[in-house]
Amino acid sequence: MTSLRPVTYEDVRWDPQGNRSGSVAACTYHPAVPVKIEHLALDLSASAFAQAEYASQEIARFDAELGGEIAPFSAVLLRSEAAASSQIENLTASARAIAEAELPGAKPKRNAEMIVANTAAMQAAIALSDILDADAILRMHRVLMANDSRHTPGEFRTEPVWIGGGATPIGATFVGPRHEIVPGAIRDLIKFAQRADVPGLPQIAVAHAQFETIHPFTDRNGRTGRVLLQAMLRNKRLTRQVTVPVSAGLLADTGAYFAALTSYRDGDAEPIVECVSGATVLAIANGRQLVADLRDIRAKWNDVITARSDSAVWKVADLLTRRAVVNAALLQQELGIDSTNAHRYLNPLTESGILIETTSGRRNRVWCSPEVLAALDAFAARAGRRTT
């Protein structure tokens, strides 16, 4: 076993020939050389281990609390995590815009489209969590980068990447490792992630920080790394049914999150473990509030809906707790309701004030639940609010 050491840096000649900045003179830049962590011994304080253990217990309690209600809330929490992860990188959209972007046949705005892609990547991560390997990571990235032809979805980079600075890596805040190093560094990361002798949440936090240090893709390394974090939570059986919106906790203090990643590169893993543990506890509190709000909203509807007990109106009401914006095509896709009959089940909900129509005309009609959208926007607002 070895202790974590600081990242070292190479001197590499930046040759403007063949690079995107042909007008820049040749000079030297300094890509990182990530340490190997396959045999890493985590040297953390007792308080850091205790904080991680408490967060792990909170995850288990949250997972158990939802019980039989997991179907609607797992989808909502997963979408909330995807939106929060995107917001860390200043990619924002309202709950309504995101929900509209998910409708069949939608033509979404760019931000909402990218957040929907992040949701799909989260779903792929959970589906792939049984076997975490390099191929699984590539598939997660491929889903996340769908419809983005500017980069190379699902492929490790073959060029330099950097954070900060300008058109070249000269003077950048951080330069990722040379691309030739990336495949081997990912193999080392996977071997660490597959170990069974490391406490789960500290292992996940370190693997996440190592992934961000490797920076294996030309774009969306941050979001892919947080997708990987969710996959590892499921792989380590810390979560079994729900997506804990950890990114919603990280949003409370993104400065501390980025500083913890820097500390990891400096050879100190404790800040990222504490950061992920604290974010998990915050996220669960926020998630509990969202679930409580949705439960209250759905229970209140029982008093205002006028429909037979066997009517599909009740199924549509249930659907609204996880899909706050609907159209006829979505009802057919999710509930098997013929699109020509959709109005029979949407009209009673509109008349009772549960739904409002957001379109005009008879074609491409869309309805939304203002109460559910308000609950989702409140969740996002709480996530971005720093606590003391």
Image (cartoon, grey):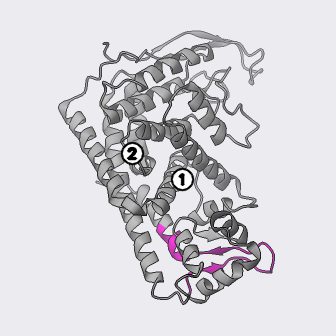
Q: Can residue 265 be seen here?
A: no
Residue located at (33% from left, 27% from top): 269
Marks 2 and 1, the one that precedes in the sequence: 1
Q: Is residue 201 left or right of residue 25?
A: left
**Disc 1, SS:** helix
Is 381 situated above or below 343? above
- Residue designated by label 1: 83
- Marks 2/1: CA–CA distance: 19 Å
Quarter holding residue 314? bottom right
Residue located at (77% from left, 20% from top): 22
> Whole-percent x and y of residue 324?
57, 69
> Whole-percent x and y of residue 46?
18, 32
Q: Which of 256 and 308 lies nearest the eye of the viewer?
A: 308
> Whole-percent x and y of residue 261?
42, 31
- The three-letter amino acid code for the residue at tag 2 is Thr
Q: Is residue 289 left or right of residue 142?
A: left
Is 270 situated above or below 305? above
| Stretch of the chain drawn in magenta | 353-375
Quarter holding residue 199? top left
- Residue designated by label 2: 239
